[in-house]
Amino acid sequence: MSNSEPAIGRVVLKLGGSKVLRAAGLDDDDHDIVTRALAYRQMSERVLSRIGAASGVASVVVTFVGFGVHGGLPSATTAGAIKSYVSGLSAGQTGLGNYLELLGYLLFLAFATYLYAVARAVGADRLHWLNVLGFAAAITYVAVSALAIAAQQVIVESGKAGVDANTTLGFYILDNDAFTMSFEIAAMFAITAGFVQLTGGFALRAIGAAAILAGAALFITGLLGTISIQSSISQVGLLLFEVWVVAASVFLLIRPTRMTRLTESDATHDRGLTAE
């Protein structure tokens, strides 16, 4: 395939597709070139759509692997519990686990960006500000989570370096609070993204409704977890949020969704992607 063929296809699409070919009196060879260009464009968008969708599943898997490597923080908010936690881990182990966990959050950001593109393609212009708000919330959520991850690494490294346990306890509280309060930001992402997806087809409306429910649950349980730092109820909301990410990711991976706005010529030539 010539490198110019995709460009030719785009030009023909903008000018009206096959009507241009007939009006220009082009022969079958020219028609084949444009047909291949259109197929190339459709295939490229389908592949990119699947890559974006797959980043959601990958983010959950990598995040949980990283968490499994470094382990969770102790539930007791005491200097003795922190000292015991630090003594049972190596800085290298927590470093690897935290690095993988952060990679998982970055993959989530890729998934959120993909959902932004999908929602931009199917959503009404009047709701674009909600789409932008959701994308900004996703960025902020990843940034706050990165702060919590860094705080956990500081806990272990400062403890290994002989820093006073009470000082290390302060980093523990920072880690725990940042992690729990980030749920409110993730909830904003889920709810705003969900509202925009409600303007799509049936499948996207189902994904959007599930996102709103998961976001509401995450917001409420995160609030309860912030009120009581030793409460584990916030993990319920996080689990529901992660289940939604995996479910939406798998569905969009199986049925790649359009990421660009549908034009009249696209409706005529591009039938391999859904906007449901």
Image: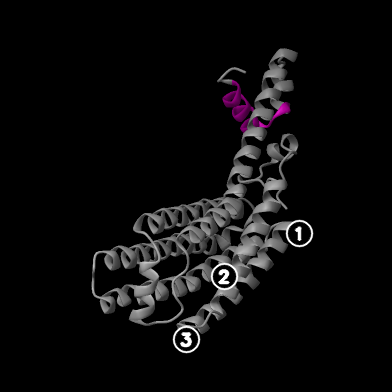
SS of the residue at dot 2?
helix
Q: Quadrant of residue 211?
A: bottom right
- In space, the residues marked 3 and 1 are separated at their CA atoms by 39 Å
Identify which residue is drawn at 49% across, 64% down: 133
The magenta span reads 5-18
Look at discs 1 and 2 and give the one toward the viewer: 2
* Residue 46 position by quadrant: top right
Three-letter code, disc 1: Phe
Residue under label 2: 238
Q: Residue at x 67, y 34 (%)?
A: 42
Residue tagged by mark 3? 228
Residue depicted at x 38% and y 56% = 95
Q: Position of residue 68 (x, y in %)?
A: 51, 60
| Residue plotted at (34% across, 58% down) | 91
Q: Which mark is residue 202?
A: 1
C-alpha distance separating marks 2 and 3 = 16 Å
Asked if residue 34 lies left or right of residue 69, the reply is: right
Residue closest to the eye, 99 or 143? 99
The span from disc 1 to disc 2 (Cα, nearest Å) is 26 Å
- Secondary-structure class at tag 3: loop
**Vertical comparison of 32 with 116: above or below:** above
**Rendered location of residue 124, percent (x, y):** 62, 58
